[in-house]
Image (cartoon, rainbow, N blue to C red):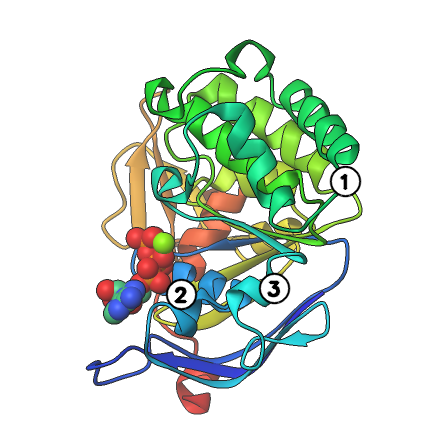
Amino acid sequence: MIRFEDVSVTYDGAAEPTVHGIELTVPEGELVLLVGPSGVGKSTLLGAVNGLVPHFTGGTLRGRVTVAGRDTRTHKPRELADVVGTVGQDPLSHFVTDTVEDELAYGMESLGLAPDVMRRRVEETLDLLGLVELRDRPISTLSGGQQQRVAIGSVLTPHPEVLVLDEPTVGLDPEQRMRFRELIARAGEGRTVLLSTHQTEDVAMLCHRVIVMVRGRVRFEGTPAELAARADGRVWSSTERDPGAWAGWRTGTGSFRNVGEPPEGADLLEPTLEDGYLLTLDGESPEEVAAA
Ligand SMILES: Nc1ncnc2c1ncn2[C@@H]1O[C@H](COP(=O)(O)OP(=O)(O)OP(=O)(O)O)[C@@H](O)[C@H]1O
Ligand SMILES: [Mg+2]
């Protein structure tokens, strides 16, 4: 389980907190996706789970983050490594060894597991991730998608209770993304997973809950269906882009899909998760303005 209690993070020299007032619980065994525009603080929030924020990044964390009962203020990233596995936004910066097999074994070695247990888990993970043929390859010679799989494999082998993945589907082609979603669904069984992404289809297919973050705050938390339902009655079709729409784009059929407040008699469409997401980004609701 991951718990944030009134958490704010202010980087050194910044005038304002990057994330603030974060109240969040990711229950044990749930897969939760974090979405939001670039720069809103998603990586900062994820970094606070494994303690990299603020222990390595610097800055000040207020409030409390607990992971599997451990407070990240008093537990350094090293002391969380057996419960949290993290893949950051740049997999290359993640690697500590040279070859695929060594990388998969590395995290377990530092936990002091028995050699036969390590052997077995490396084999299982090579198999699960389709890396068997690449086992002896220097990591530097792999494609971006292959490196991404090695990075994920290396956090799976120590069997952490909690997985934190920062935009793990960036750089993957559509087929790899699909395989990745299957993989995460399997790897996520019985685990708590917090994953950030810019791909709304990842959200729809993967998660129990989704969190939308805007400007350092959580603006929405709920199921994918609840997010899509935010756009009920607020998506319509027209032959020209509707100037009154908050957003509108031409679809494959040549008509326009508009989101916002529809005009009288508009041709309403079934909302998708992306529509709900876009509308969630649009402005602040009166309640939110009052609360700020
Ligand atoms: N180590 C750091 N020191 C100072 N400022 C930082 C640091 N890391 C991030 N920031 C700032 O905090 C803000 C949020 O960054 P963050 O990386 O958390 O956003 P993000 O939502 O993950 O964005 P993206 O979708 O582009 O990955 C940005 O303005 C960024 O410049
Ligand atoms: Mg980020």
Seen at 42% across and 57% down, the residue is 279
Q: Position of residue 275 (x, y in %)?
A: 46, 47
Seen at 33% across and 79% down, the residue is 59
In the displayed structure, 279 sits above or below 205; it is below
Residue 8: numbered disc: none
Residue 114: numbered disc: 1
Q: Position of residue 99 (x, y in %)?
A: 46, 24
Amino acid on which the number 1 mark rests in the picture: Ala
Count of marks placed on residues? 3
| Chain-order first, disc 1 or disc 2 | 2
Q: Position of residue 148 (x, y in %)?
A: 45, 31
| Chain-order first, disc 1 or disc 3 | 3
Question: In the image as oriented, which residue stretches furthest toward the top?
Answer: 133
Q: What residue sits right under mark 3 in the picture?
A: 80
Q: What residue sits right under mark 2 in the picture?
A: 44
Alpha carbons under labels 1 and 2: distance apart: 35 Å
Q: Position of residue 257 (x, y in %)?
A: 37, 38
Q: Give the structural element (helix, strand or loop) at label 2.
A: helix
> In the image, is 246 to the left or to the right of 42?
left
Task: Report crowding for label 1: few under 14, some 14 to 19, many 20 or more residues within 10 A (C-alpha).
Answer: few
